[in-house]
Image (cartoon, grey):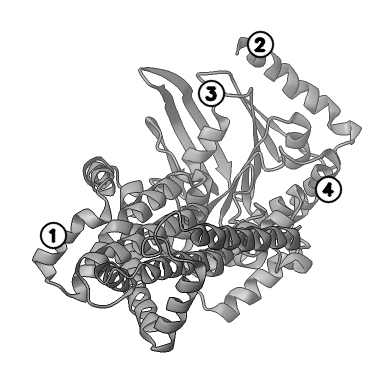
Amino acid sequence: MTKLEAKNIVKYFKHDSHRLKALGGVNLQIEDGEFVCLVGPSGCGKSTFLRIVAGLEIPDEGEILFDGKPVTTTGPERIMVFQEGALFPWLKVQDNVEFGLKMAGIPKEERTEISKRYLDMMQLTKFADSYTYQLSTGMKQRVAIARALVMDPDVLLMDEPFAALDAQTRDLLLVEMQLIWEKTKKTILFVTHNVTEATVLGTKVAVFSNRPSMIKKIISVNYKRPRLVEDQNLFPLQQEILSELRPEVKKS
Amino acid sequence: MKKNTLAKQIIFYVALVAIWQIVSMTNIWPNNLFPSPYEVAEDLVYTASDGSLFFGIATSLLRLIVGLTIAIVGGMLLGIFMARVEIVNQTIGSLVLGLQSIPSVAWVPLAILWFGLTDGGIIFVTTIGSMFAVTIATYTGVKNINPHYIEAAKNMGAKGTQLATYVLIPAAFPYLISGFKQGWAFAWRGVIGAELLFSFLGLGFLLNVGRQLNDISQVFAIMLVIMMVGIAIDGIIFKRIENKVMSRWGLR
């Protein structure tokens, strides 16, 4: 079943007087439960595309269909995980995780019960009462993922969530992310500039061209999980993606 | 470190009083223009023992609290609207900047005409003299919120009052607290100024009585009290809130 469909998405960046065509008609179809990684040269608008899917930005042309219905605004069925987590520094970890439930008017006991489950899943139980400044970058990103999962969204939108992590922490989270995906069966859209990350995580990797961006190629990754960063068998696929990307990066 | 500072301060103030005493003993200025610290202390003991000092402090503080509370609530509301609704900023925003430049005592004639010689008039002066400082701080604070906080909150279903209460105000709090501090300082000036001009109670009134009776010791004594109340409120209330907020945010 098609969960998400992008139909000819066009978006201009506006800088004072001139406009720059960032997205030049992106078409993408995502089935329920797929894990799609978006890679592309920096500045190609892949993050903007993700924001459009989230409903945080409105495309200049085209539309996003979620379960066949056009997306016009943000919704709890499409939850975004930001690059730096965007955790609320005035709340404890547990209250951060429960935020969306609180907004939905769910009573305290029920919230605690739900958040406990996800704090446990993300190995955060010990840090439930910490403030975010007391956490490492990796821990913060776990909290951000827990905060998104608590909403039980159909689609998880992740904007380079591991970009700021050190290599060891990232490798660990790459494995965990696969387990979470297998456990929760969420549809995931994951923006990254890291080809290895994309092949490790994705069921599909969509390669963006340079501006005005379109999807140049979609590569399926059919390989057993959990996949590891150092897995040599993913190497040919990574080479293939890189060979698609290289001319695009040169153009920019 | 902290102890050291306190010791330095004690030495400084003891020295200051000693110099004051010496200068007053030289009789450079006549005693009815420049009292000795002993005379001022005597006056303080006297006004304290008949209760008029404490009654004066209580009266002024009560007016301050009422006026400042209205100013903080009103100022925050206005500031949030200015920051979130562009048309409000473009119209009322410019007016706020203008009103902010009017010293609080300049509102006194208007207050007397509108409210008569009443507490209402003094509270009006206090409120209007401090509200716009809070407004401007709130506006700046909300404008400087990391946009991802607001996007994440909206994505998780927060809107309207919920967004303001659970996100905008706490996220802007480091700015708000400086606005409150500034607002309080303006409010305290406003109360004393207004009392000086048209009240029969309060510290400002006692100060004016001192002038009318040519009682220089009382003038000195009341000024000292005004200063000490100021230091106390700043140190006890605002410093604490500030420290708490800063440490929670990991800023200190």
Q: Chain of mark 3?
A: A
Image position, residue B216 (x, y; %): 36, 67
Say what amino acid the circle numbered 4 marks. Leu
Give the residue number, with chain letter if any, for mark 4: A172
Callout 2: SS: helix
- Is residue A152 something that shows in the picture? no
The answer to which of marks 2 and 3 sits earlier in the sequence is: 3
Q: Which residue is mark 3?
A: A214
Q: Residue at x 82, y 47 (%)?
A: A225
The residue that appears at 40% across and 70% down in the rendered structure is B217
Q: Which is more toward the observer, A156 or B6?
A: B6
Q: Which residue does the image show at 35% across and 70% down from the upper left?
A: B64
Return the disc, 4 or 3, that comes first in the chain's sequence: 4
Which of pointers 4 and 1 indicates the residue nearer the eye?
Answer: 1
Frontmost of labels 4 and 3 is 4
Query: For the residue carrying disc 3, how many other residues have a C-alpha within 10 Å: few (<14), some (14-19), or many (20+)?
Result: many
Q: Which quarter shows the C terminus of chain A? A: top right
Q: What's the distance in space between the residues labelled 1 and 3, CA to CA?
A: 65 Å
Point out the tag, 2 or 4, that comes first from the N-terminus: 4
Q: Which residue is mark 1?
A: B110
Do labels 4 and 1 touch, CB within 8 Å? no
Specify whether residue B56 is in view. Answer: yes
Q: Which residue is mark 2?
A: A250
